[in-house]
Amino acid sequence: MKKPFFALIASIAFAATAFAQTTVSEPWVRATVPQQKASGAFMQLRSADAARLVSASSPVAKSVEIHKMEMVGQMMKMREVDGIDLPAGETVNLASGGYHIMLVGLNKQLKEGENVPLSLLVERKQGKRETVVVNAPVKALTYAAPKAAGVGHAHH
């Protein structure tokens, strides 16, 4: 009687972990000054299989956009993109100066020590979607994330 029960429990545990295909590490949001209406969210994303971050949302902002910073000639330009590819098994770094998430139309000042809830929508093959909920700590305006060693980069 015990063997089938443990096999059932093990298969349920495996199914639950297999469903969570996308993992988030080192999430953080930049603090704001009073009256500032936008901020950036940064993190590392890793997907077990090929996927794409297609949107994000947060109750602290009117809209949440996926952006990319890049050099265009001699100028750094930021533009909204329709998603970020997450190659299978690779870590994609969302950081200042590259891909990141913009919180636009903030409804309050973001202060160091607070947490910002984010929902990330990841799309897989055959249109399967996964929502990843992140609780990102707010870091000081002067905070700089440590450089991630050996982190892959997504190409749009």
Image (cartoon, rainbow, N blue to C red):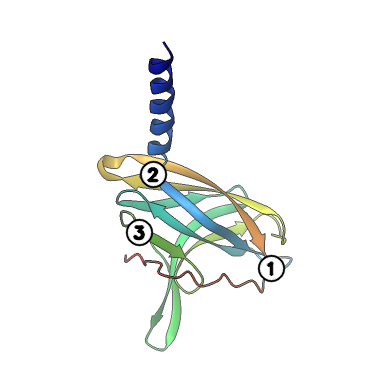
Residue at numbered disc 3: 90
From the top left corner, tell me how far across and down residue 107 is, in percent. Answer: 67, 54
Q: Amino acid at mark 3?
A: Glu
**Residue depicted at 45% across the width and 42% down the height:** 131
Is residue 2 depicted above or below 66 in this figure? above
Q: Do the CB atoms of the residues marked 2 and 1 lie less than 8 Å apart?
A: no
Q: Amino acid at mark 2?
A: Gln
Give the mark nearest the N terminus, 2 or 1. 2
For this orientation, the residue located farthest to the top is 1
**Residue depicted at 70% across the width and 55% down the height:** 114
Secondary structure of the residue carrying tag 2 is loop
Secondary structure of the residue carrying tag 3 is loop
Residue at numbered disc 2: 21
Residue at numbered disc 1: 140
Say which of 82 and 49 sits in front: 49
**Residue depicted at 44% across the width and 77% down the height:** 77
Q: CA distance from mark 2 to mark 3?
A: 12 Å
Is residue 146 depicted above or below 41 in this figure? below
Q: Quadrant of the C terminus?
A: bottom left
Is residue 133 depicted above or below 9 in this figure? below
User: 10 Å neighbourhood of mark 3: few (<14), some, or many (≥20)?
Assistant: some
